[in-house]
Image (cartoon, helix red, strand yellow):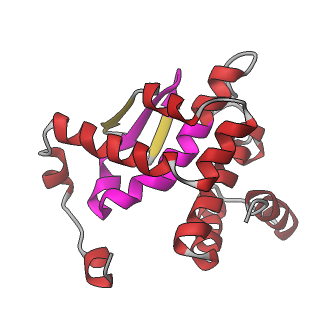
Amino acid sequence: MSDKEKDEKFSLEDVKKIPPKMLLRIIDKAKEFVKKDETMIEAFEEYGIDINEIDYYPMYFADLEVSAKTDHSVIFFNYKLLCDGFEAILPYMIHEVTHCIQQTTGEGPTQGANDGSYLDNKSEQEAFQNQVKFLSEHEGDNRAESYVDDLLKHHEIKGPKKKEELEEVLMEKV
């Protein structure tokens, strides 16, 4: 993709006009892409699941207050992600599919985003590690580091020691 194409944005109004069938095709295209991605393949292998199971995880676009979320192994992406183009959903798909794997292979549901400290949550850490690794592999280490910095700022992590500790955990697979 050229730099010019990366700079072009779509309006949220235009994105919401995309027919549902086309949105599902976008999701299917993203699934096919991540099924060939090393990070996603390793995540499925770690849990002993065939990568093609991803085809059975329901995924939709919705109006959300966050970029993406998984609820009872159903993945929702914020429409706003598509304003930046197809590629913008890929790192979030890696993250949320990690949660589906966790939820469908564990003893029960994963800890919710509002249960305790979000970034200290082991399930979230694993999902972010996969997302950050994907960003590093596809957009470079600087992009991955920038994403982690933004994430820590967004969650208002206070104190250099705590910030450094979380940074190390989130960058572990890079």
Q: Quadrant of the C terminus?
A: bottom right
- Give how far across and how far down residue 117 sits, in percent: 74, 41
Number of numbered labels in the structure image = 0
- The residue at the far top in this view is 107
**Above or below for 8 versus 174:** below
- The residue at the far bottom in this view is 3
- The reply, left or right, for residue 130 in relation to residue 121 is left
- Give how far across and how far down residue 28 sits, in percent: 34, 40
- The reply, left or right, for residue 151 in relation to residue 13 is right
Q: Quadrant of residue 85?
A: bottom left
- Give how far across and how far down residue 45 sits, in percent: 70, 38
**Above or below for 111 versus 68:** above
Q: Quadrant of residue 156?
A: bottom right
The answer to whether residue 3 is magenta is no
Q: Residue at x 79, y 60 (%)?
A: 172
Q: Nearer the viewer, residue 121 or 105?
A: 105
Q: Nearer the viewer, residue 10 or 112?
A: 10
Q: Residue at x 55, y 54 (%)?
A: 37
- The reply, left or right, for residue 127 in relation to residue 14 is right
The answer to whether residue 90 is magenta is yes
Q: Quadrant of the N terminus?
A: bottom left
Q: Residue at x 65, y 72 (%)?
A: 145
Q: Nearer the viewer, residue 53 or 83?
A: 53
Q: Residues in magenta?
A: 70-98
Instruction: Give the dominant element type of the magenta stretch: helix, strand or loop.
Output: helix
**Above or below for 21 versus 94:** above
Q: Residue at x 57, y 65 (%)?
A: 135
Q: Quadrant of residue 116?
A: top right
- The residue at the far right in this view is 161
